[in-house]
Image (cartoon, helix red, strand yellow):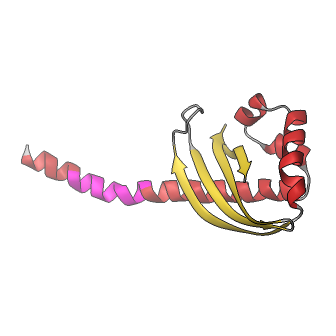
Amino acid sequence: MKRIACSTLILLLILLPFASRASEQKQRDAEQEAGKWLALVDGGQYQESWQRAASLFKRQVSAEQWHQAITAARDPFGIMISRQLMSSAYTTTLPGAPDGEYVVMQFKTVFKNKQQAIETVTPMLDEGNWRVSGYYVR
């Protein structure tokens, strides 16, 4: 029995770095997609950002609703000057969302008319691809 427990512990210690690297790769992939998606929003390409969003996002918000909401939220801030990733966390659960694979990112962003904003972008694994499922700016 002691030998089985020791073998299990050794196996876990061997596999742990691989699991960690896998979630780190998922975070990097999600961050890359978030950057592409934010570039569309920054460029005023709101229709394209909706089309590229996760199916969950599109089921909750029509393209017209998204255009109205993002225009109201972002246009008063002016152009984006700089954006710095503050945090990125991989998770499989979020309040009010179905279980899945998500990466919640927060960016410290400077806009022409808003010097200190926090953007929260949440990509999710959607049909094998990372796509943004949520965006909030304050």
Q: Is residue 121 magenta?
A: no
In depth, the one of 37 and 76 nearer the eye is 76
Which percent across, then down, holds residue 110? 77, 68
The residue at the point 58 percent across, 45 percent down is 102
The residue at the point 31 percent across, 58 percent down is 14
Residue 46 seen in this snapshot: yes
Which percent across, then down, holds residue 42? 85, 59
The C terminus - image quarter: bottom right
In depth, the one of 51 and 95 nearer the eye is 95
The residue at the point 90 percent across, 54 percent down is 75
The relative height of residue 81 versus residue 119 in the rendered view (above or below) is below
The residue at the point 83 percent across, 49 percent down is 73
Q: Would residue 90 be found to the left or right of residue 1 on screen?
A: right
Q: Which stretch is magenta?
A: 9-19
Say which quarter of the image contains residue 63: top right
In depth, the one of 102 and 20 nearer the eye is 102
Which percent across, then down, holds residue 74? 85, 53
Which percent across, then down, holds residue 1? 8, 43
**Main secondary structure found in the magenta portion:** helix
The relative height of residue 85 versus residue 23 in the rendered view (above or below) is below
Q: Would residue 89 be found to the left or right of residue 134 on screen?
A: left
Q: Is residue 10 magenta?
A: yes
Residue 40 seen in this snapshot: no
